[in-house]
Amino acid sequence: MTAFVPGFENDLFISYAHEDDARWVHAFADELRDEVSRRLGLSVSIWEDKGRLRAGENWQDAIHEGINLAAAFVAIVSPRYQNSQWCARERHLFRDRVGSDAELESSGRFFKAVKTPWPKNGHRFFLGAIQDVEFFKEEDGGPREFSAGTKEFKRAVRKLADGVELALRKMRRGNQRVHVAWPIEACLTAWEQLSAELRTQGFDVQPTGPRDSSFGEGLILEDMDRAVLSIHLLGAAYDPFSERVITLAADLNQQLIFWIATGADTATDERQRLLIDAIRRGVRPGSPQNVLPAGWTLLPDTGVRRLIDAVLTKLRPQAVTAKPVAPPATTTPTVYIVHDATTAEDTRVALLLKEQIHAKENMEIFISRTDLPSLTELKLRHENLLRSCDGVLLYRNAAPEGWWNQLAPEVLLAERRFERQPIKSRAFLLPKTPDWEVGPDVRVIPYTSSFQVSDLEPFLDPLRH
């Protein structure tokens, strides 16, 4: 999954104390991702520490990269966050990217979600210029945290999403370059109005001033560099420089918009008539055997306001949906064995479980994988299996604690996250009972050295009916 903000790998970095409730944090990240994605009409990406980094010495490289490649930063504030060295390091890394504490507070890219207040409300003096979004309520017996999934929790997420949505939209536009080619004199007013509107909307508009044949090709290419759209305004007069710029943009395979001013179709200059005719036919000027890049647009002169609206529509984020990776249609029960596919010992047991359950029950068994071409495809496969399988069995033995903290909440919250029917059977296969209550609809099955597939009977029996 790519970030909503161009130039970043992830839109949000969520910093939290790992001693806090991992299930609450995971539900918070899911709810915030879903709410902001719904508003933007395009999925946002969140960098997640799988929990393995802090156990070793490689935190500097991995977390530094995660923060450097994130557009905005969300701190889940709690008393544990206040005293966490790791959280301080993450916060300082992000601050160093922005500047001073004062610049961080005014950047609009740092957010505070207060899960639990500090003693004597000290959290209000932590980066005090940044508004707190409180996920608790003061009551006679002390502060009460909002439980994940409650109306109060969702209301607080929506309040936080107000600021996050605005920041991501602003950053996306600031990172999007639009090339509006310098036009002939007759189209200059339209160029000025269009350029001014795009700059007001926050886009990086190039060029910032006149361009003509005295500018070398390298300088023109600098104007076009990284542009998501190249716009060309054409009048009745022929300009060889304008034709050259169109050719350069087509060579860069950029998205092209052509605006034909009123009267241009009746140009007396044969060269201008040939240029406009080539564009109407979708071919490059002077090279009729080569077509224009896919997605080019030709606009008639129906007023500058409509031109501006058409350009803004073109720049509006368009949702891209990846092809789901779902299990094949089948009338037999389907089971997803969730395990750490990067841990050799757990992978060996998962493969053995798959073979034995299939042989005994003739069920369709899926296990976690690492061999797909991209992380996006791996994530889609995992989510589609959680969305569709009849039974989910989470197995963990040698996998790191961080893997468990990440995956257990995903299994527990699958119905809420994917709005699916209740999972018919769900179980954790573990060497020891979790420290926290897993809930009445999850069976905890001990995994011992003498484990046999028959020990899975509490998990398998509901799937037979």
Image (tube, rainbow, N blue to C red):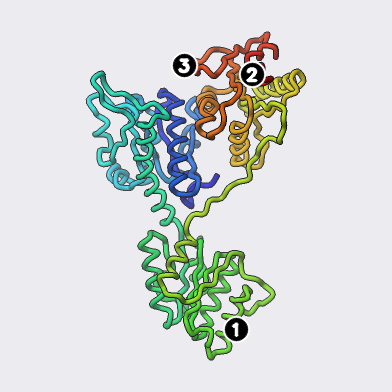
On screen, residue 42 versus residue 278, left or right, reads left
Q: Give the residue at mark 2.
A: 462
Hey, what amino acid is under mark 2?
Pro
Kind of residue at disc 1: Leu
Q: Nearer the viewer, residue 52 or 77?
A: 77
Mark 1 is surrounded, within 10 Å at the Cα level, by few (under 14), some (14 to 19) or many (20 or more) other residues, namely: some
For the image, the number of numbered tags is 3
Q: Secondary structure at mark 2?
A: helix
In this picture, residue 323 sits left or right of residue 144: right
Q: CA distance from mark 3 to mark 1?
A: 75 Å
Snapshot quadrant of residue 148: top left
In the rendered image, the vertical position of residue 460 relative to residue 318, given as above or below:
above
Callouts 3 and 1 close, C-beta under 8 Å: no
Q: Residues within 10 Å of mark 2 (few under 14, many from 20)?
A: few
Q: Position of residue 308 (x, y in %)?
A: 43, 68
| For discs 3 and 2, the disc positioned in front in the rendered view | 2
The residue singled out by tag 1 in the image is 274
Q: Earlier in the sequence, mark 2 or mark 1?
A: 1
- Mark carried by residue 436: 3
Q: Amino acid at mark 3?
A: Trp
